[in-house]
Image: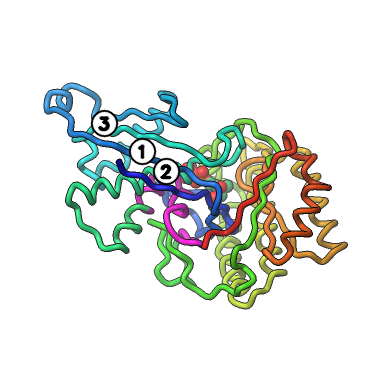
Amino acid sequence: MITFKAPSNIALVKYWGKKGEQLPANPSISFTLSHCYTETSIAYQRRSAATMATDAPFSFDFSFDGQPKPSFHPKIEAFFARIAPYLPFLTDYHFSIYSHNSFPHSSGIASSASAMAALSVCLMQVARELGYTYSEEEFWQKASFLARLGSGSACRSVKGSIVVWGQHPSIAGSSDDYGIAYPLQVAPVFAEYQDTILLIDRGQKQVSSTVGHNLMHGHPFAEARFLQANNNIDRLIGAFATGDIDTFIEVVESEALTLHAMMQTSIPYFILMRPNTLEVIQRVWQYRKDTKVPLCFTLDAGANVHLLYPKSVKNEVQTFIKNELAHFCEEGKYINDQLAN
Ligand code: DP6
């Protein structure tokens, strides 16, 4: 049995808008998390010539948390169809896929990134077992390439602590095809950077990311937004190198609000923030003003709030969260995580 644990990631500069076959409209950069992950195992056996001739092109079963989940089949089927040109053995085997998330399924935390990343790495390990040879670099690059075809942000969940996806002139080796480990200098203040995820709304998203990305086609602000993301990557490069947390905060919060502004100004428009998302944001700003503690927030495509802060202020921020923010979370729940090493 082959097993791989792929982490979740949280984007600092956001991917929102795509072109061609899952290529990003702008480069993005993310923190890889330590405690939120998907663990996937795969067993495989050769299909008989008879079933290959008569049955569906792909043969697999899938269980999640120990329970068969036929509702996930169409997603996996579509993913297999997309990556089969790059892994031709996919049609020749039956795959038993077992998956598990470290975080609750109903937490509103997007699991597609870690799930597609874990599945892609497992399939690359299958390829190796079947005799395909790859250098270490080729292996991880191709795993990220495949993950991207499952879900764009998944290509940032394969390997690395800070990951860049999308070609950017200031980052050598960056590519629209796969994520790479951030190759430039990062000041020590960002080591083990903390991410506390406030579970504001654990319900299903009303609008999928895929639909949202597509609404960037013909969006009145698209071009300016893509340019801004490129500029924000340059600003982050500077902030990472010098340990400039003020610039880091400005870029990260602006990116979060811009992402949601794009949603709110597309046609059709939609709002994924909830009243408690805004309550939390106001309180974070007030806290930062009063205490000078460099706590900031980011958002993904949902109502939950990711709180980002250096490890050195962990104690005071945890007290603040417990006393002043936890009651804005569903059932008072939040998850403490941190940047992977
Ligand atoms: C807001 O990667 O979930 O989290 O490629 O259609 O699967 P698909 O979209 P997905 O989009 C993630 C969008 C985001 C920002 C980000 O992670 O960069």
* Residue 307 percent across, percent down from the top left: 69, 53
Which region of the structure is painted magenta?
A: 144-165
Question: Mark 1 or mark 2: which is in front?
Answer: 2
Residue sitting at the far top: 54
Judge left or right: residue 323 versus residue 247. right
Please tell me which residue is depicted at 30% across the width and 45% down the height of the picture: 123
10 Å crowding of disc 1: few (<14), some (14-19), many (20+)? some
Contact (CB < 8 A) between labels 1 and 2?
yes
Residue 314, image x and y in percent? 72, 60
Asked whether 100 or 72 is in front, the reply is 100
The residue located at (46%, 52%) in the rendering is 157
Residue 240's spot in the image, x, y percent? 60, 72
As shown in the figure, which amino acid type bears the numbered disc 1? Phe
State the separation of the CA atoms marked 1 and 3.
Answer: 11 Å
Residue 80: image location, x then y, percent: 31, 37
Q: Identify the residue under disc 1.
A: 79
Circle 3 — which element? loop
Question: Disc 2, ligand 1: is the CB inside 8 Å?
Answer: yes
Q: Earlier in the sequence, mark 3 or mark 2?
A: 3
Instruction: Tell me, yes or no, whether the two marked residues, 1 and 3, touch with CB atoms within 8 Å.
Output: no
CA gap between label 1 and label 2 equals 9 Å
Vertical order, 237 against 199 (above or below): below
* Element on which disc 1 rests: helix
Which amino acid type corresponds to the residue marked 2 in the rendered image?
Met
Instruction: For marks 3 and 2, give the CA distance.
Output: 17 Å
Residue at image point 70% right, 54% down? 297
Query: Was residue 184 drawn as part of the magenta stretch in this picture?
Result: no
Question: Badge 2 is on which residue?
Answer: 116
> Circle 3 sits on which residue?
58
